[in-house]
Image (cartoon, rainbow, N blue to C red):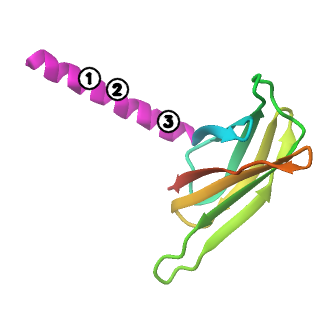
Amino acid sequence: MKKLLLKSALVFTAVLLMAGLAYASGLHVMGQMGDLKVHVTTDSAPQAGKNLVTVRLFDRNGKPVTDALVRVYWMMPPMGTMPLMKGMADAERSGSEYRAVMNLEVSGEWHAMVKVKRAGKLLPPFKFDINAQ
């Protein structure tokens, strides 16, 4: 019984440490947009104010996609007397990455979305949430 409790405590501690490292190192989400894989990251933990967002796109063979137009959207629904807050930024390509500055007006839960246009075709959006401190 003591060994089981000790193992459980060690596993719980490891999970907390990994969560803390993930939080400290920033946002990292992955998903699909049509036939492309998308990775969205921030350099540091999202916070109220300006946040650098990096979007990486990969084709089905894992090759970076560098011929797309990328736009990042964010919004926080109205709460109480606070109005709807939203923004949008066109991402600039830098090598095999696309970078945009996302200005989150206040801390809290934000909904975000990446839209990509490639070869004249708009791909399904990639949606994710951000908890800004």
Q: Mark 3 sits on what residue?
A: 22
Where is residue 72 shown, x and y percent of the image?
73, 54
The residue range painted magenta reads 1-26
Label ID, residue 14: 2
**Quarter of the image holding residue 93?**
top right
Label count reads 3
Where is residue 18 shown, x and y percent of the image?
42, 30
**Mark 1 near mark 2, Cβ–Cβ under 8 Å?**
yes
Q: Which residue appears at 78% of the width and 58% of the height? A: 89
Alpha-carbon span between mark 2 and mark 3: 12 Å
Residue 8 in the magenta stretch? The answer is yes
Residue 89 in the magenta stretch? The answer is no
Q: Which residue appears at 87% of the width and 35% of the height? A: 66
Where is residue 81 shown, x and y percent of the image?
49, 84
Q: Which amino acid type is marked by label 3?
A: Ala
Where is residue 17 shown, x and y percent of the image?
38, 31
The majority secondary structure of the magenta stretch comes to helix
Q: Which amino acid type is marked by label 2?
A: Ala
Q: Mark 1 sits on what residue?
A: 10
Q: Which residue appears at 22% of the width and 26% of the height? A: 9
**Mark 2 near mark 3, Cβ–Cβ under 8 Å?**
no
Quarter holding the N terminus is top left
**Could you tell which of marks 2 and 3 lies nearer the N-terminus?**
2
Specify the farthest residue to the top.
3
Say what secondary structure mark 2 lies in: helix
Disc 1 crowd, CA 10 A, few/some/many (<14, 14-19, 20+): few
